[in-house]
Image (cartoon, coloured by chain):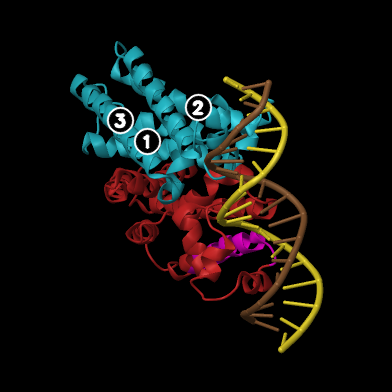
Chain colours: A red, B cyan, C yellow, D brown
Amino acid sequence: MYLADQLIRASGYHSFSYADISKPLEVKNAAIHYHFATKADLGLAVINQTRNNFLIQIEEWAELSPLEQLQAFVNLYMDISQNNLVCFMGALGPAYTSLPDIMKEALTQASDEIRAWVSSVLSKGKADGIFSFQNASQDQADVIITSLLASLILNRVTGEAIVQSTSQLLINNILA
Amino acid sequence: MYLADQLIRASGYHSFSYADISKPLEVKNAAIHYHFATKADLGLAVINQTRNNFLIQIEEWAELSPLEQLQAFVNLYMDISQNNLVCFMGALGPAYTSLPDIMKEALTQASDEIRAWVSSVLSKGKADGIFSFQNASQDQADVIITSLLASLILNRVTGEAIVQSTSQLLINNILA
DNA sequence: GTCTATATGTTGATAGAC
DNA sequence: GTCTATCAACATATAGAC
């Protein structure tokens, strides 16, 4: 599970095999199939675990200010970049059309959850007077999410710390 | 070539096979190998063709104003979204670590070219007084590029027209 | 330049013993 | 719950005829 997650975020759903998981665990691939009948089941489990982790996180952040919540969200991407990975949406999203249906559904639900939360944080911050922006909260949220997501991708392609500069800019841009 | 490009932008380098190309063309896979000895050669050709197209494009845009140039750049993403694809960087970047070395190099060079051009357009626009932003041109360019790139990804995952709203917001944000 | 034929490896997956 | 053994399908790639 943990390994599958790392492998997916390292290079995607189609780039890893049961052998990549069973070998490091010093187990046979049949053992993996016992826990996850098909590869789609494994992929789905990874998505849903990530969704669940996110829901737990934002629950823990409930008492923070909108700015602190946004900072905490950005820090998720920082952590991922330090492991030289991309986020699960960036890893699975581009191959969306080639994913099993059950993974597509879960991925779409995940995007809904993330977008709704960021949007709500921005709305609250705007109402509190800490954030200031002209556009709809959802549009502003989408700019932040998409930029962070692809910053992780460009981090690896360019070898530069793109996510560092973009995340700072994105936050500064909406500070009142 | 054209087909390989479409297939890569549809779901990535690892998701298509020689059969996906030879069948629609009503040819045998050996015929493809004649033109591209290895799959890596084919992938490299797709990247370099895209790079070349981009260099030709910005050459044609040379006489436009910085704002028009930025608009033209954004329109590239609009066109891609209408075909329900992602850009080649979004398709190949997440799988970067699993790509053949020759493709990695070309992809890194492509990112350098794109980032440098957008950054230069923003610099010119700022000098001309049409653009206004606080941060380094490269950082501002990176926010725009990453947001557009991942907007195409989220377009497909969410089924919504994310790239429409984000691109408008990104341009409005830097207008003087 | 495309074909047939084939080599060689890997994939996800299953049956049945322990 | 993990093993051995095996499967069919598919992958990339090559040799040699036309």
Residue situated in front as seen by the camera: A82 or A19: A19
Which residue range is magenta in the image?
A: A37-56
Tell me the chain of label 3: B
> Which residue is the site of mark 3?
B113
Q: Are marks 3 and 1 in contact (CB under 8 Å)?
A: no
In the image, what residue type sits under mark 1? Ile
Q: Secondary structure at mark 2?
A: helix
In the image, what residue type sits under mark 3? Glu
Which mark is in front, 3 or 2?
3
Residue A38 in magenta stretch: yes
| Residue depicted at 41% across the width and 33% down the height | B169
Q: Are marks 2 and 1 in contact (CB under 8 Å)?
A: no
In the rendered structure, the answer to whether residue A8 lies left or right of residue A45 reads left
Residue situated in front as seen by the camera: A85 or A59: A85
In the image, what residue type sits under mark 2? Met
Tell me the chain of label 2: B
For marks 3 and 1 on the same chain, the one whose residue lies earlier in the sequence: 3
Residue B107 in sight in this render:
yes
| Residue depicted at 53% across the width and 36% down the height | B8
Quarter of image, res B83? top right
